[in-house]
Image (cartoon, rainbow, N blue to C red):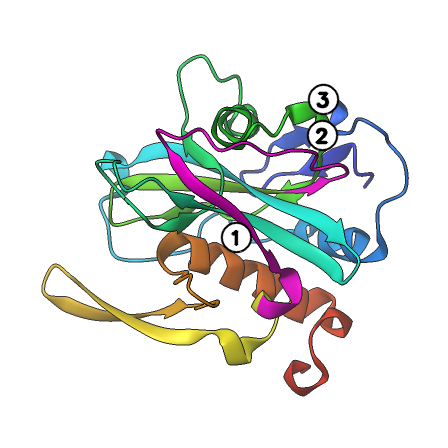
Amino acid sequence: MSLNDRTQPSGGVVKTSDTDPAGSQLPADCERIAACLAGPEVTERPGLPLDRSALRDAAVLVPLVQRPAGLHVILTRRSEDLASHAGQISFPGGRIDPGDATPLKAALREADEEISLAPSRVQLLGAMPHYPTATGFMIHPFVGYIRDSGILVPQPSEVAEIFEVPLAFFLDPANHRPHHIEHQGQQYRLHAMPYGDYYIWGATAAILRELYARVRGHAPEMLPEHARP
């Protein structure tokens, strides 16, 4: 299957003609990640026990950019003024609006609005399983390669900071720490990935953990030697 016609976890097809500005060869690790996301997988990760019928759809972009030291993940720190998830670390993304033709279009629109990342600069690598959250959303994650990140500008009402973390950090399970939360009187063990002053947890960490699991299963050569199966 080509990069221009990649299957979604939902069973549909992600058309990348609008998100492949150059159509040229990807970095080798991006090719590996695209292959990891191309296989038949479950459409949804279980997460916490939730009433799925009450969840609202949202979409996020997991942006990967090539740096001299390797691929980096672009993340944001949300504004402290927001009513929900204030100050938390997240991917660019948000609710799927009625005017969004697809979840992918919503993720690209939100990335443009939040950090000035134009859709024309994103080459889609694939989609990941939907992830339900305790805050009432079903998240549709998409992974994209940013050929030229250019100047990213945070939308101040939503984003306090834009920063990058080496993908290699998230692909090392030694950096995945237990994170316990309580939901409806029950304790659940999730994961967090603290990076310097940034405490990455919740859905963001869960999506990164899923990406790690895909790489571990399909491209273990990308993992540090001590973590390879």
The residue at 51%/48% (across/down) is: 129
Q: Nearer the viewer, mark 1 or mark 3?
A: 3
> Which SS class for mark 3?
helix
How far apart marks 3 and 2 lie (CA) works out to 10 Å
List the residue tagged with mark 2: 121
- Give the image quarter of residue 49: bottom left
| Mark with earlier residue (1, 3) | 3
- Amino acid type for the residue under numbered disc 3: Asp
| Mark with earlier residue (3, 2) | 3
How far apart marks 1 and 2 lie (CA) works out to 29 Å
| Mark with earlier residue (1, 2) | 1
142 or 73, nearer to the observer: 73
Q: Are marks 1 and 2 in contact (CB under 8 Å)?
A: no
Residue 11 vertical position relative to residue 34 in the rendered view, above or below:
above
Where does the magenta region start and end? 144-169
List the residue tagged with mark 3: 18
Mark 3 residue crowding within 10 angstroms, few (<14) / some (14–19) / many (20+): some
Residue 13 vertical position relative to residue 52 in the rendered view, above or below:
above
List the residue tagged with mark 1: 42
The residue positioned farthest toward the left in the image shown: 185
- Amino acid type for the residue under numbered disc 2: Arg
How far apart marks 1 and 3 lie (CA) works out to 26 Å
